[in-house]
């Protein structure tokens, strides 16, 4: 269930494997080479390069780091970088922190610039379903706690 995601200038496709309020796991793929701004998140993001490559130009740095297949790339929370993804690259991405904070950046270009509401709804569905599930579990647990307290 891949859907297009474009933000900060880069463009690719994503399949969400797991989404909760504090963690997500997804597969990111790009068929064409693409580059742009990484985004600055309230999340620690770890990317495992399955195939292809990723260049990272970190803030206040004057060189690019190049990460190729088999390498793990860290993007600590609050940091930003220029990124460039090679054509035909695949990544397994793990994010940990406050997940809803990333959704505004991740969806803003699609919503306000490209107006691709099909991709936008896919993104909201993939992320919203995970968050809704979490909210449901929270309510269920709260009710169980109330019942125990009686
Ligand atoms: C990074 O590696 C890829 C694949 O080997 C290569 O095509 C690209 O030019 C490299 N980038 C830099 C800055 O060396
Ligand atoms: C993110 O990484 C920093 C530095 O390694 C750590 O102090 C912080 O607890 C991490 N946050 C989460 C939510 O894992």
Image: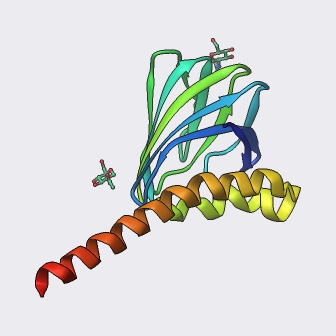
Question: Coloured how?
Answer: rainbow
Q: In the displayed structure, would residue 92 be above or below residue 121?
A: above
The structure residue drawn at horizontal position 70% and vertical position 58%, both measured from the top left corner, is 107
Compared across the picture, whether 80 is left or right of 10 comes to left
Residue extending farthest left: 149
Seen as rendered, the residue at the extreme bottom is: 150
The vertical placement of 91 against 83, above or below, is above
**What is the x, y in percent for residue 142?**
27, 77
Q: Quadrant of residue 139?
A: bottom left
Where does residue 133 sit, x and y in percent of width and height? 45, 60
> Does residue 62 appear in the picture of this structure?
no
Snapshot quadrant of residue 10: top right
Q: Quadrant of ligand 1?
A: top right
Position in image of residue 98 (x %, y %)? 43, 62
Q: Is residue 70 above or below residue 115?
A: above
Quadrant location of the C terminus? bottom left
Quadrant occupied by the N terminus: top right
Q: Nearer the viewer, residue 110 or 78?
A: 110
Note whether residue 74 is visible: yes
Residue 20 versus residue 7: which sits nearer the camera? 20
Residue 91 image point, x, y percent: 55, 28
Look at 60% across and 21% down and name the residue there.
53
Q: Is residue 38 left or right of residue 33?
A: left
Left or right of 72? Residue 59 is right
Residue 146 as seen in the image, left or right of residue 65: left
Marker count (numbered): 0
Q: Residue at x 79, y 62 (%)?
A: 111
What's the residue at 55%, 58% (across, down)?
A: 129
């Amino acid at each position: 269930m891949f859907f297009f995601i474009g933000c900060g200038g880069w463009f690719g496709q994503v399949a969400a494997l797991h989404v909760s309020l504090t963690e997500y796991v997804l597969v990111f793929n790009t068929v064409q080479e693409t580059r742009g701004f990484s985004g600055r998140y309230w999340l620690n993001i770890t990317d495992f390069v399955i195939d292809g490559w990723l260049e990272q130009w970190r803030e206040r740095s004057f060189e690019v780091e190049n990460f190729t297949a088999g390498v793990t790339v860290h993007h600590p929370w609050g940091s930003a970088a220029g990124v460039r993804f090679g054509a035909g690259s695949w990544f397994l991405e793990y994010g940990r922190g406050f997940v809803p904070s990333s959704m505004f950046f991740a969806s803003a270009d699609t919503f306000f610039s490209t107006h691709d509401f099909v991709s936008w709804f896919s993104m909201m569905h993939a992320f919203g379903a995970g968050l809704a599930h979490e909210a449901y579990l929270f309510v269920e647990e709260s009710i169980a706690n109330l019942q125990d307290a009686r």
